[in-house]
Image: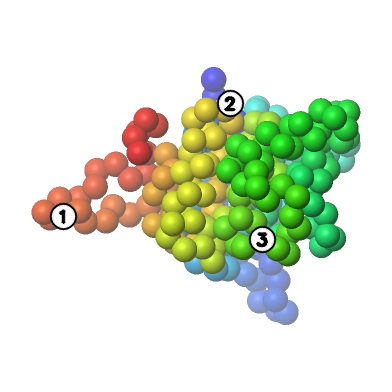
């Protein structure tokens, strides 16, 4: 079938005064439908920039980004907006600044293409899918960090995108909440026709993914293989079995 998302030789730099900061250096990756890829790196390593470039919300200085075989650089503003509306979901750590109910927040992007009844039905299903139906009528301010992350995922999957980009969903979560979020994302990938590209602040948060890479000094590399008990080494870290837990 080929890759749903493909980055080749992507580079991105920013200027701080007279100094050039190279955020991404010759980054390449392929992500297929049914694949859950995690990229881990420290704060400021370029993880969010990578996701923005993958969605063409930011342009690379060099390299190409293809979605389903289409070079995103060639899309018009209207074509890109349609792509984001129909095929790419973005999960942020920030929510609405108003006092919207979470049901309204999740339904909002659906109203552009669906009737109000259908939009709210889909929104309710997405909120139930992530396990926080009891919070549908609450505001963002009333939720804890873990609940906000799950609502963000509901907001991202409600339109049933083909690609879900998830920016540091485990930041500030405890071990139980982190496991709940990453297991949910894995189950979504394996049950829906979707791919997920997730960034996380540490390798432990990435262990539910099928593919793990690290981002450091602007370069994307395969994750190191940590020692296992008995002196053995893990032979499969970068590519984990799709059916394993």
Quadrant position of residue 67: top right
* Marks 3 & 1, CB-CB < 8 Å contact: no
Quarter holding the N terminus? top right
Quadrant position of residue 109: top right
Between the residue at mark 3 and the residue at mark 1, the CA separation in whole angstroms equals 39 Å
Image x and y of residue 48, in percent: 63, 57
Residue assigned mark 1: 229
Q: Secondary structure at mark 1?
A: helix
Q: How many numbered callouts?
A: 3
- Given the current orientation, which residue lies at the most extreme top position? 1
- Given the current orientation, which residue lies at the most extreme bottom position? 17
Residue at 49 percent across and 30 percent down: it is 190
Is residue 235 at least partly visible in the picture?
Answer: yes
Image x and y of residue 45, in percent: 54, 64
- First of labels 3, 1 by sequence position: 3
Q: Counting other residues with Cα less than 10 Å from the Cα at mark 1, is it few (<14), some (14-19), or many (20 or more)?
A: few
Residue assigned mark 2: 193
Q: Of circles 2 and 3, which is in front?
A: 3
- Given the current orientation, which residue lies at the most extreme left position? 230
Residue assigned mark 3: 143
Quarter holding the C terminus? top left
Colour style of the rendered protein structure:
rainbow
Residue at 39 percent across and 57 percent down: it is 204
Residue at 65 percent across and 43 percent down: it is 133
Q: Secondary structure at mark 2?
A: loop
Apparent side of residue 111 relative to residue 70 in the rendered image (left or right) = right
Between the residue at mark 2 and the residue at mark 3, the CA separation in whole angstroms equals 29 Å
């Amino acid at each position: 079938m080929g890759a749903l998302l493909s980055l080749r030789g992507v580079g991105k730099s920013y200027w701080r005064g007279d100094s050039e900061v190279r955020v991404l250096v010759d980054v390449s990756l392929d992500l297929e439908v049914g694949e859950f890829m995690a990229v881990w790196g420290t704060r400021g390593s370029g993880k969010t920039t990578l996701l923005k470039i993958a969605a063409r919300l930011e342009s690379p200085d060099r390299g190409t980004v293809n979605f389903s075989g289409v070079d995103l650089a060639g899309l018009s503003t209207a074509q890109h907006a349609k792509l984001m509306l129909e095929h790419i979901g973005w999960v942020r750590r920030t929510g609405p600044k108003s006092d919207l109910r979470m049901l309204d927040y999740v339904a909002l992007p659906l109203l552009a293409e669906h009737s109000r009844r259908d939009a709210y039905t889909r929104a309710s299903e997405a909120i139930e899918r992530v396990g926080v139906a009891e919070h549908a009528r609450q505001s963002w301010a009333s939720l804890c960090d873990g609940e906000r992350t799950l609502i963000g995922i509901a907001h991202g999957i409600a339109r049933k995108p083909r690609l879900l980009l998830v920016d540091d969903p485990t930041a500030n979560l405890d071990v139980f909440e982190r496991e709940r979020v990453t297991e949910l994302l894995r189950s979504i990938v394996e049950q829906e026709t979707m791919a997920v590209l997730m960034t996380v602040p540490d390798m432990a948060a990435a262990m539910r993914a099928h593919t793990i890479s690290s981002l450091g000094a602007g370069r994307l590399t395969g994750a190191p293989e940590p020692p296992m008990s008995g002196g053995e080494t893990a032979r499969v870290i970068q590519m984990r079995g799709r059916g394993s837990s």
